[in-house]
Image (spheres, grey):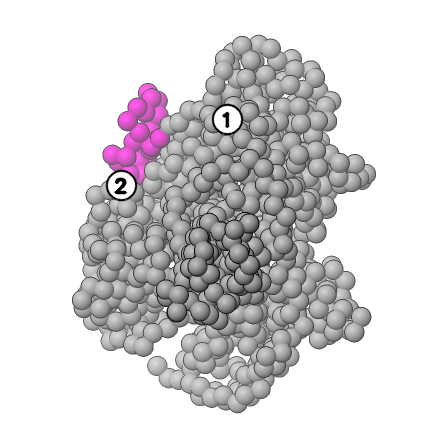
Amino acid sequence: MKTIPVSTRVNGDSVEFLCAPEETLLDALRNRLGLTGAKEGCGSGDCGACSVLVDGRLVCACLVLAAEAEGAEIATVEGMAEGERLHPLQRHFIDSAALQCGVCTPGILVAAKALLDHNPDPSDEEVRYWLAGNLCRCTGYDKIVRAVQSAAAEMRGA
Amino acid sequence: MTRQDKITRAFKQVGTRPPRPDGIDKVTGRAMYGADMTAPGMLWGKVLRSPHAHARIRSIDTSAAEALEGVKAVVTGADFTLPEDDFYRDVAVNCMAQDAALYDGHAVAAVAAVSEAVAKAALKLIKVEYEVLPHVIDVDAAMTTGAPVVQPGRAYENVPEGMSENVTSHCEFGHGDLAAGFAKADVIVERSFRTAATHQGYIEPHACLASMGGDGRADLWCCTQGQFHVREVCAEILGMESSQLRVTASEIGGGFGGKTTVFIEPVALALSRKAGRPVKIVMKRDEVFRATGPTVHSSIDVKIGMTRDGRITAGEAHLRYSGGAFPCGTVDMGAQSAFAAYDLDAVRTFGWNAMTNRPKEAAYRAPGAPQAIYAVESVVDELCQKLGLDPLDVRILNAARKGTKSAYGPTFDEIGLLATLEAAKAHPHYTAPLGPNQGRGLSCGFWFNFGGNTCVTMNLAFDGTVTITEGNPDIGGSRASISLMAAEELGIPYDKVRTIVADTASIGHNDITDGSRVTFSVGLAAIEAARDAIAKMCARVAKIWGIDPDAVEWKDGAVHPSGPNAGKFPPMTLAEIAATSPNTGGPIAGHYEVNADGAGVSFGVHLVDVEVDPETGATKVLRYTVFQDAGKAVHPDYVEGQMQGGAVQGIGWALNEEYIYGEDGRLQNPGFLDYRVPVASDLPEIETVILEIPNPGHPYGVRGVGETPIVPPLAAISNAVSRAAGVRLTELPMSPPRILKALSAQG
C-alpha cells in the first residue's frame, strides 16, 4: 500500500510521519505519534471524544484524513497545559467535579477552549449548544457547564 | 459487620469535596484507557460478525484469510472448549458462535494481523456458509407457541401450555390476599406498558490487549468493571488456571453495568495463544451496539386498586422481559423491585423471561428495576389523577418505612423513602407554576444495593504516607471516597493517602464493581484495614513505651497514653511510628477481607417539569430535581454526579433511546447518530438534594448511590408528559411520533 509523507505541527512541535491514504488523523495521532489523549468513541463524528483543533478550527479527528494535516497546526488535549501549569479549564474541570470516567473529557476540554477562544463570556445556553457535539454519559453535563463558566469567569478576570 | 445503631461521629474529612486523585491524568490525556495500551510485537485483532438475526453456521472456510500476508492467526468457535457450566458456556458462546448465529452482530470468527488494515482485509476472505433461520425479536411474540425457537433445550422446566420453549424462567413474589385487596378498592386501574431495549452507551468502546506466552501464562489489559471476574471467565473459557492469567483493569471510559462481562477478551487471548504474540482488539461503535449488552426490553401489565382517600389496597404486576438470545434472570429483579416503595397488605408480581434474537443482555444500572417501577408508578399517577389526589401525598401515605414487610420479602430496616418524599414536598420545585402544554411528574425509585467479596490492603510507607490497594475499577470517583474514608479513620490528611486499583495477582478476589457496592464495601474494608493497622501501631508504641497495649489509644492520627496508669508519654504520630517501624518489628500494613452484607437499600424521588409541543410531539425537559438518600455522602460532588448522570440516562430512556429492528431482524440504528443519547442542549440544570439517613450496616452509614437515580426518570417523565398532553402514555421511548399518535388517537 502506498504511504503518504506528512509534515505538520502538533502542539507546537514539528512532526513527520507516513500514513496510509485512508488513515484518519485520529489514528495517526494515536497510533503513529503516541498521542492517545483524543479517543475514538464512534468513528463517525457523533460523539466528539476525538475533538482537536486544526489551524484553530474545532474538528473531529476521526473525520479528517491524516494526509490533510500536511502543513497544518494541530492542537490536542496534550498541549493544553503549559508544563505543570494546567489551563484554567482543566483546573476547573477537576475542582468542579466535571468529569467522572473522563473518557469524553479531552474532547470536551478542546471544544470548550475553542468556544472560549472566540466567545469569552458565553451564556449557559451557548455553552450547552456549543458542546452538543460532545457526548458525556456520566455527568448529565450539569457540572461540565458550571466548570466551563467558572473557568471563563476566571479567564475574563471576573 | 456489626449493626451500627447510631452513627453520631463528627466527620472531619468525610463529606468534604477534595479534588479526585485521577483528575490531573484525565484532564491532560495521560490516563490510560482500554484502547491506549500497546505492546512490542503487538498484532491487531478483528472480529467477523453475523449479518443474520438467526442462522445455522454450515461451514467456515478460513484458508484464504490465513493465506493473506500479515495474518498471524484465525480463530472460530472450534478454537474454544465449551465450559460445562451453563453460565460460563453462555458467555463463551456469546463471545464466539458455535453452530448458530443467534443475533445480528454475533461473533463468528476473528483474525490477528500485523495491522488493522490487514486484519480488516482478512475478515473479507473468510467464507461463512449460513442457513438462514426464522427469527423473533419481540418478547410477546417470542413467548407464544409456534414462535421461532432461539435456542432449543433451554426452556423453563414448567413452561405452561400455550407458551413457547423460548421461555426460560418464571418467578413470583409478594404476599397477602389480592382478591380481598381489590375488593376493598374504590377505583382499580389496569394498564399495559412496553419499554424498548436501551444501551448503556458508555463512550469508550470495549478494548483489550492480551499476551499469552508459550508456557500458558498470560497477561490481559482491558477496560472492565471487574478484573477478577474477567480472569475467572477467561480462564474457564480458555481452560487455564486462574493464577496463570493476570488481568489488569485500565481506566474505564464508562460502564454502567455493561462492562461486567466479557466479549472480546477470550477472543484476544485465543488469538494471542495461536499467534504467540500480543493481540489488541478494539471494538468499533457499531459492534458495541450490535454485540454488547443492551437492557432487556419489556412488556408489563399492572393492576392497582386504591381507596378514595388514596390508600393502595392491592397491587399486581405481570412482567415479560427478554434478555436476548440467552436465558436471563433480570426479570427477577424487576419483579422484586416493582412495588418496593409501598407498604402493602396485598401484592403479587409474576415475571417471565423469553429468548429473542437480540444480543445477550448485560447489566445496566439497577437492571430490571426501571421498567417495572415505570409501569407501577404510571398506574399510581393515573389513580391520583382519577381520584383528584396529590401524587406526593399518596406516596407519603403508602410509603414503605422501617418495619414494612417489603413486596419482595425482607422487612425494611432504616430507610430514607419518607424523608425523601417529604423533602420533595417541601421543595419550591413542587409548587412552582406551570404554563400551557406543561406538566409535572414524579416517581419513586429503588435499588437493593449490594456488598459482596472485598479485599483491601493498606500499607504504610516509612515517610508516613499510606497506600490503599483495592481491586475494584473506579467508575464513579471511588478512589477519592475510599481515600477520604481511610484518611478519616487514620486521622491523617486526604493527600497522604493514595488508593490504587490493583491487578488480579496483587490483591485477593474482589467482586465486580456493580450493585452500587464499591463505596459501601471497599470503603468498609478500607476503614477496617485502617483499624487493623491502628491496632498494630498501638502495639508497637506500647512496646516502645514499655506499657500494656490496653494502656494506649489512637486519637487524631497518633498513639496516646490512655488511662491513669499509662504514664506520661508524648503522643507518637503515624508518621513517627512509620519512620521507626524498621526498628520496632518491620513494615506496618493493615488488611481486611469480607463478604460484606448490610448494604442498605436506596430510595430516591425525582420531580420533573416538561413541555410537550402539540404540533411536533417533541418534549422539552424544563426543570429536574433529584432527591436521594445517600446514607452518608462521602464525597458529595460524586454523589451528585451519580444522581445527575443517572437521571440523564433515564431521560434518554424515556424520550429518545431505543433499539430499532427491521423486518430482517437486523439492528437499524447501531450508531450515536440514530441511537441518540441526550446531549447538553437537550437538558436543563439537574438539581440535587442529598438526604442522609445512615445505613446501620456501614461504620459511617454509607449506602450505595449509583443505581437508584436511573429508576425514577422513566415514570416521572411519562407522568409529566401524560399530564401535559392530557393523554396517558404507556410506551417508551416517548419519541415525537408516539406522542403525536397518542394525541391524535385522543382526538
Is residue B510 part of the magenta span, yes or no?
A: no
Q: Position of residue B704 (x, y in %)?
A: 53, 44
Residues packed near mark 1 inside 10 Å, few (<14), some (14 to 19) or many (20 plus) = few
Percent across and percent down for residue B636 are: 63, 52
Indicate left or right for B150 with B241 as reference: right
Name which residue lies at 28% across and 48% down: B93
| Mark 1 lies on residue | B411
- Observer-side mark, 1 or 2, equals 1
Looking at the picture, tell me which residue is in the foreground, B581 or B132.
Answer: B581
Q: Nearer the viewer, residue B207 or B474?
A: B474
Q: Earlier in the sequence, mark 1 or mark 2?
A: 2
Q: Can residue B719 be seen in this view?
A: no
Mark 2 neighbour class, 10 Å CA radius: few under 14, some 14 to 19, many 20 or more: few
The quadrant the C terminus of chain B occupies is: top right
Disc number at residue B86?
2
Q: Residue at x 28, y 50 (%)?
A: B92
In magenta, the rendered stretch is: B145-169
Q: Which residue type carries mark 1?
A: Thr
Residue B355: image quadrant is top left
Q: Which residue is drawn at 61% across and 38% down?
A: B693
Whether label 1 touches label 2, CB < 8 Å: no
Output the chain of dot 2.
Answer: B
Identity of the amino acid at label 2?
A: Asp
Position of residue B741 measured from the top left corner of the image (x, y, whole percent): 63, 36
